[in-house]
């Protein structure tokens, strides 16, 4: 009962996959953020990738975060530009509707 051996925490072996290296946690955080806020996630993913590359480690979450946030950021920019183009093209029809000279040039009577 009282004479049981206490296990030494320092002697417990951890798998090689779970070793800590610079940029590991930041890469995971960047991967989570890449689905919600792309620009900060892209920056964090690049920083984590560089930090882990400097010590010779392969940081897969950082690489995936850079890819996902970059793709979603590009898609968001394209959608925004397309939306602006659509609004401008539809709004052009309403811009000169009250100008009588423009209506007369088109041959429309007022």
Image (cartoon, rainbow, N blue to C red):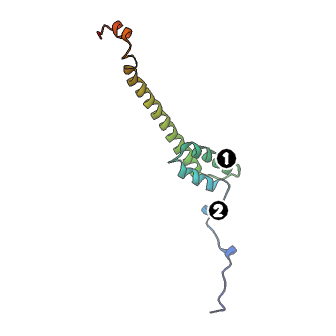
Q: Position of residue 106 (x, y in %)?
A: 33, 9
Determine the secondary structure under disc 2: loop
Q: Nearer the viewer, residue 109 or 32?
A: 109
Q: Using a 10 Å C-alpha cutoff, classify the residue at mark 1 as few (fewer than 14 neighbours), some (14 to 19) or many (20 or more).
A: some
Q: Quadrant of the N terminus?
A: bottom right
**Residue 19, label in figure:** 2
**Tag 1 or tag 2, which sits nearer the N-term?**
2
Q: Residue at x 64, y 62 (%)?
A: 19
- 42 vs 90, left or right, is right
Q: Mark 2 touching mark 1, by CB under 8 A? A: no
Q: Position of residue 86 (x, y in %)?
A: 40, 27
Q: Using a 10 Å C-alpha cutoff, classify the residue at mark 2 as few (fewer than 14 neighbours), some (14 to 19) or many (20 or more).
A: few
In the image as oriented, which residue stretches furthest toward the left?
Answer: 109
Q: Position of residue 43 (x, y in %)?
A: 61, 44
**Residue 50, label in figure:** 1
| Figure quadrant of residue 83 | top left
| Figure quadrant of residue 24 | bottom right
Q: Quadrant of the C terminus?
A: top left
Q: Is residue 60 visible?
A: no
Q: Nearer the viewer, residue 109 or 33?
A: 109
- 101 vs 45, left or right, is left
Residue 72, above or below 20: above
Q: Residue at x 60, y 61 (%)?
A: 17
Q: Is residue 19 visible?
A: yes
Q: Position of residue 84 (x, y in %)?
A: 45, 29
Q: Residue at x 64, y 49 (%)?
A: 48
């Amino acid at each position: 009962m009282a004479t049981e051996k206490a296990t030494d925490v320092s002697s417990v072996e951890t798998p090689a996959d779970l070793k800590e290296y610079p940029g590991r946690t930041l890469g995971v955080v960047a991967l989570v953020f890449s689905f919600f806020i792309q620009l900060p996630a892209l920056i964090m993913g690049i920083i984590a990738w560089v930090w882990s590359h400097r010590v010779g480690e392969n940081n897969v979450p950082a690489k995936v975060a850079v890819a996902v946030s970059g793709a979603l950021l590009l898609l968001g920019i394209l959608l925004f530009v397309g939306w602006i183009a659509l609004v401008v093209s539809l709004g052009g029809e309403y811009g000169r509707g009250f100008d009588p000279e423009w209506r007369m040039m088109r041959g429309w009577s007022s």
